[in-house]
Image (tube, coloured by chain):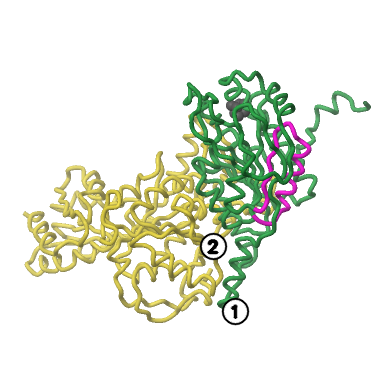
Chain colours: A yellow, B green
């Protein structure tokens, strides 16, 4: 399915990451946005509130983030493509119903424009320290999909991609951007609508009375049941069976949770998106995501000029973690380096997957500002020793 | 009677609206919830609504289980979030009747903020709140509705917090329809639910219902049946009563009736009118996403 031309601002624009993200959502066909103001994400909500009335859609400023997240699940259940955006403290509140979205398997997109934490932290300055919260923030076992744009252009593109993944895998998808990308203004090229491919929601082909809400196809993903069409289905945040009925047993729980995990784990090759450069034959591979993957560039170039064999991987998706790829690389390289604006979160995954086969280095940062190229350069020098 | 015993056991009169494959339900004998669910089912039946066009949303708790027993599109959400979930659902599908059915702890304690804001916006939905004065599912803890001096497992020496007066809370927050009945007033409760569902805007029905297992036991009030007798002797019907005067004290008179029934534009009407006024032809009116949205 192609995007609706009435919703796509085709052309070259000068936009910040937050505005570009809003345009991505509109182009993707988002028609419901429940939000709550919080710095540094608010511009997404503001842009949506201006644009929706002209393209079709409801922006509602909910009473808090608990409600925002609940509302986008409700609207998505009603058939809308839905989104919300937030930052640190709001993300914490949203974790409750993010878990409900995982359990109900409700497509929707949640954007976290990361700032410095913990608590109120640094409202106006960047961080990447919510990455583990993105992975584990709601209680229980589950898998997530999280994307990390590095620019306004990618904020536009990855928002569309996030909607597509959420529809394809019937689950909430996270966009883990940050204040720097959110407020950075750059050229954004929005293509014609017929060049924007959208994934249509998969509804059941079965008739009312024959269909259940959790009856997976061969790909492990259950087609949704539409509301208001006589299916009279039930869905619950409780552990449930294929009928959506609560079943409070260990056996049902295994069936339920395993499916939530499998639908991501069985499709990691489709979901994981890495941009690799000069990785073959590299002695050191530097990994980063979001803004840090741009910040690492000057340090890598400098090291390369000095003859150091440095490869780089920009993780467009951070979750699911590219476990297989890291294991392969660990057997080949001297060192893996992770650059991230926190004190070692995704690094822990890299280190786990390296499993002692190579050295691992963290170039962490407290946040509030991006890394200095020298810190990354020094880490590369250390890593190649 | 010409009905044989055999025929009588064959079909429950509300079978068309209940998930019979989930019966028996989890509720205790003489709990007021069954009666309240029957009132909802009867109201829906009386209104001759298309069952396909009704959604029920519940939160967590004994009452939160209601969504799971209604043979309608039904959603069992998180604790306190039934209303905001329903807000999204309603906006996506405004042609459907959205009914939130949950308990007092769920709707006005953890969900209190959503309750007042959704009433303020006058979102077109019906909220049925079963008030049994206690957190039942978790074992009888004090609720924001527990009357002063009443005992609960976390107010073992009697509750000393002022409880909410729910009709006043709903009315002052902007509800267009506010009524209170008890589980004893089945006919009037059914009628009130039917009126609330038909009402445009945020309609609210409080149902005072016995929690036989916890509230009654912890307060030595006898069985659920004894509480029904208490309602019989102490409920005072006062339509149009000033909501400031319908507080409930421990084992006091309970004022019931229809307190508020007013007209006011709904959230979606305001949204469409407000945007049309400013944007004119440029505005794309919102009609939900059942069609081509
Ligand atoms: S604990 Fe109380 S409210 Fe819950 S089912 Fe039993 S009687 Fe009803």
The residue depicted at 54 percent of the width and 29 percent of the height is B148
The residue depicted at 27 percent of the width and 59 percent of the height is A289
The residue depicted at 73 percent of the width and 34 percent of the height is B236
Which sits in the foreground, A366 or B141? B141
Q: Can residue A211 be seen in this view?
A: no
The N terminus of chain B appears in which quarter of the rendering? top right
Q: Which chain carries label 2?
A: A
Q: In this view, does B221 lie to the left or right of B140?
A: right
Residue A304: x percent and y percent? 11, 67
Q: Is residue B181 magenta?
A: yes
Q: Where is residue A212, by image quadrant?
A: top right
Q: Mark 1 points at which residue?
A: B280
Extent of the magenta region: B176-201
Q: How crowded is mark 1: few (under 14 residues within 10 Å), some or many (20 or more)?
A: few
The residue positioned farthest toward the right in the image shown:
B2
Q: In this view, does A355 lie to the left or right of B243?
A: left
Which labelled disc corresponds to residue A25? none
Which labelled disc corresponds to residue A200? 2
Residue B91: x percent and y percent? 59, 59
Q: In this view, does B245 lie above or below A203?
A: above
Helix, strand or loop at label 1? It is: helix
Q: How crowded is mark 2: few (under 14 residues within 10 Å), some or many (20 or more)?
A: few
Which sits in the foreground, A112 or B114? B114
Residue A103: x percent and y percent? 49, 44
Q: In this view, does B220 lie above or below A60?
A: above
Q: Nearer the viewer, mark 2 or mark 1?
A: 1
Q: Where is residue A369, by image quadrant?
A: bottom left
């Amino acid at each position: 399915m192609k995007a609706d031309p009435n919703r796509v601002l085709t052309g070259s624009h000068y936009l910040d990451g937050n505005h570009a993200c809003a345009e991505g959502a509109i182009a993707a066909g988002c028609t419901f946005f429940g939000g709550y103001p919080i710095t540094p994400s608010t511009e997404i909500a503001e842009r949506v509130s201006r644009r929706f009335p002209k393209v079709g859609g409801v922006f509602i400023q909910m009473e808090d983030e608990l409600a925002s997240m609940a509302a986008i699940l409700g609207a998505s259940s009603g058939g809308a493509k839905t989104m919300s955006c937030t930052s640190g403290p709001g993300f914490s509140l949203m974790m409750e119903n993010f878990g409900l979205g995982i359990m109900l398997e409700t497509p929707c997109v949640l954007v976290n424009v990361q700032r410095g934490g913990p608590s109120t932290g640094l409202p106006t300055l960047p961080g990447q320290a919510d990455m583990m919260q993105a992975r584990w923030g709601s209680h229980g076992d589950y898998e997530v999909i999280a994307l990390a744009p590095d620019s306004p252009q990618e904020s536009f593109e990855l928002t569309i991609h996030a909607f597509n993944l959420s529809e394809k895998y019937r689950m909430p998808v996270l966009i883990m951007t940050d204040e720097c990308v959110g407020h950075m203004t750059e050229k954004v090229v929005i293509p014609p609508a017929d060049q924007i491919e959208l994934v249509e929601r998969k509804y059941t082909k079965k008739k009312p009375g024959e269909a259940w809400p959790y009856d997976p196809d061969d790909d492990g993903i259950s087609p949704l049941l539409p509301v208001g069409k006589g299916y009279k289905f039930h869905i619950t945040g409780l552990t449930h069976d294929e009928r959506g009925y609560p079943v409070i047993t260990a056996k049902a729980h295994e069936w339920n949770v395993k499916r939530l995990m499998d639908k991501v784990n069985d499709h990691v090759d489709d979901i994981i998106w890495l941009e690799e450069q000069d990785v073959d034959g590299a002695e050191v591979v530097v990994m980063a995501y979001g803004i840090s993957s741009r910040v690492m560039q000057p340090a890598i170039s400098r090291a390369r000029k000095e003859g150091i064999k440095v490869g780089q991987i920009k993780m467009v998706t951070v979750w699911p973690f590219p476990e297989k790829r890291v294991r392969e690389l660990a057997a080949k390289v001297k060192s893996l380096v992770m650059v991230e604006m926190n004190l070692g979160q995704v690094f822990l995954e890299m280190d786990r997957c390296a499993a002692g086969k190579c050295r691992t280095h963290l170039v962490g940062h407290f946040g509030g500002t991006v890394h200095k190229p020298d810190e990354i350069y020094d880490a590369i020098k250390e890593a190649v020793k | 009677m010409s009905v044989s015993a055999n025929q009588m056991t064959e079909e429950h009169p509300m079978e068309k609206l209940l998930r019979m494959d989930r019966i028996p339900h989890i509720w205790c004998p003489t709990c007021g919830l069954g009666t309240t669910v029957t009132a909802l089912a009867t109201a829906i039946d009386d209104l001759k609504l298309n069952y396909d066009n009704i959604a029920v949303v519940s939160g967590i708790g004994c009452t939160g289980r209601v969504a799971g027993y209604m043979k309608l599109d039904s959603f069992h959400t998180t604790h306190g979030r039934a209303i905001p979930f329903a807000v999204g659902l309603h906006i996506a599908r405004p042609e459907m009747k959205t009914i939130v059915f949950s308990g007092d702890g769920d709707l006005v304690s953890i969900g209190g903020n959503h309750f007042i804001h959704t009433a303020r916006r006058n979102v077109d939905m019906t909220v049925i709140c079963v008030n049994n004065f206690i957190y039942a599912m978790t074992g009888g803890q004090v609720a924001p509705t527990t009357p002063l001096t009443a005992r609960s497992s976390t107010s073992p020496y009697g509750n000393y917090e002022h409880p909410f007066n729910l009709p006043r809370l709903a009315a002052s927050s902007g509800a267009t329809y506010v009524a209170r009945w008890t589980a004893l007033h089945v006919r009037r409760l059914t009628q009130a639910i039917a009126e609330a569902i038909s009402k445009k805007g945020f309609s609210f029905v409080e149902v005072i219902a016995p929690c036989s297992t916890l509230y009654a036991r912890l307060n030595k009030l006898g069985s659920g049946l004894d509480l029904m007798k208490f309602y019989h002797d102490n409920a005072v019907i006062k339509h149009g009563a000033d909501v400031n005067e319908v507080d409930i004290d421990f084992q006091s008179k309970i004022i019931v009736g229809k307190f508020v029934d007013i007209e006011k534009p709904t959230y979606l009407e305001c949204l469409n009118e407000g945007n049309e006024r400013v944007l004119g032809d440029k505005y794309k009116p919102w009609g939900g996403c059942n069609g081509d949205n």
